[in-house]
Amino acid sequence: MRPVRLAITGAAGRMGVRLVALGHQGEGTVVTGAAERAGHGQIGHDAGMVAGIGPIDVTISPDLKHAIGRADVVIDFSVPEASVHHAQVAGSAGVPMVLGTTGINPEQQSAISRALAGVPHVQAPNMSVGVNVLLKLLHMAASALDDSYDVEIVEMHHRHKVDAPSGTALRLAREVAAARGVSLDGHGVFARHGVTGPRKRGAIGLQSLRGGDVAGDHTVIFAADGERIEIGHRASSRDTFALGAIRAARWVVGRPAGAYDMQDVLGLK
């Protein structure tokens, strides 16, 4: 069986170089395309050299249409505006996509969903296998613990992250809300400052910390009178997200057109 051929967007970025390295050297996959934004200093360079694994005869291109030429699936960890364009290119070419970009607003999400409607695609705010197991455990906990248990979600990421709360924190909060039969819009508390008054029963708190090179820490706290439960995940390397995305890429090829997430990939639904 031939390996799954990957096209990597943002191939010279922090996630892109790990996707190139792990995707080309991993079992069952090979990188055949790499793209970066127009004007990037690594355009025209060998993607393997940029990723530190030696030449792989794949040149970083400013044109995803060119990079996608021989690919079975596109992996995209970029920024929302770019992801909309990447989805349009992949959808038009009939190529499946794995999308890990966070900070996507509703209008952008609608555009992405329309663009990818005709192809199978996996989209998740966090591609880590561990985080997606955490989501399953969290749903069980939130279903069993009523709103006498106050919920707080604390996340920390590196100083360069531009969106807050993290997409993963929002996904965790929505999982709690769904298990309790409420909406995050009506129960989420995203910041506290000054005299806030007593905590409202049923509130779901989210707090964001930024600093250093933290790849991603998430902790969900259930606090009640007399006891506290904490469920968490700490990522020490971006490789965990890259490996999850590559696993999703292998899984999505050949699936029926439609939207999937990592819970589908891992058989947790």
Image (cartoon, rainbow, N blue to C red):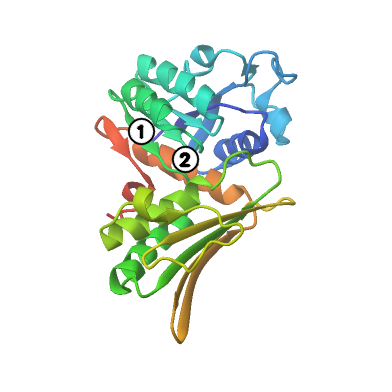
The one nearer the camera, 254 or 182, is 182
Q: Which mark is residue 11?
A: none
Residue 57 position by quadrant: top right
For numbered disc 2, what is the local secondary structure? loop
Q: Residue flagged by tag 2: what amino acid is it?
A: Gly
Q: Position of residue 119 (x, y in %)?
A: 31, 26
Q: Identify which residue is drawn at 49% across, 29% down.
A: 6
Q: Position of residue 244 (x, y in %)?
A: 48, 47
Q: Relative to residue 66, is residue 220 depicted above or below?
A: below
Q: Relative to residue 126, is residue 81 depicted above or below?
A: above
Q: Which badge, 2 or 1, is on the more N-terminal residue?
A: 2
Q: Which mark is residue 121?
A: 1
Eye-nearest disc, 2 or 1: 1
Q: Identify which residue is drawn at 51% across, 56% down.
A: 206
- The residue identified by callout 2 is 28
Mark 1: few, some, or many residues within 10 Å (few <14, many ≥20)? many
- Whole-number angstrom distance, CA of label 2 to CA of label 1: 19 Å
For numbered disc 1, what is the local secondary structure? strand
Question: In the rendered view, does 198 fall on the left or right side of 216?
Answer: left
Q: Quadrant of the C terminus?
A: bottom left
Q: Identify which residue is drawn at 36% across, 14% down.
A: 92
Q: Relative to residue 163, is residue 266 depicted above or below?
A: below
Question: In the rendered view, does 217 fall on the left or right side of 265?
Answer: right
Q: Relative to residue 11, is residue 231 depicted above or below?
A: below
Q: Residue flagged by tag 1: what amino acid is it?
A: His
The one nearer the camera, 170 or 243, is 170
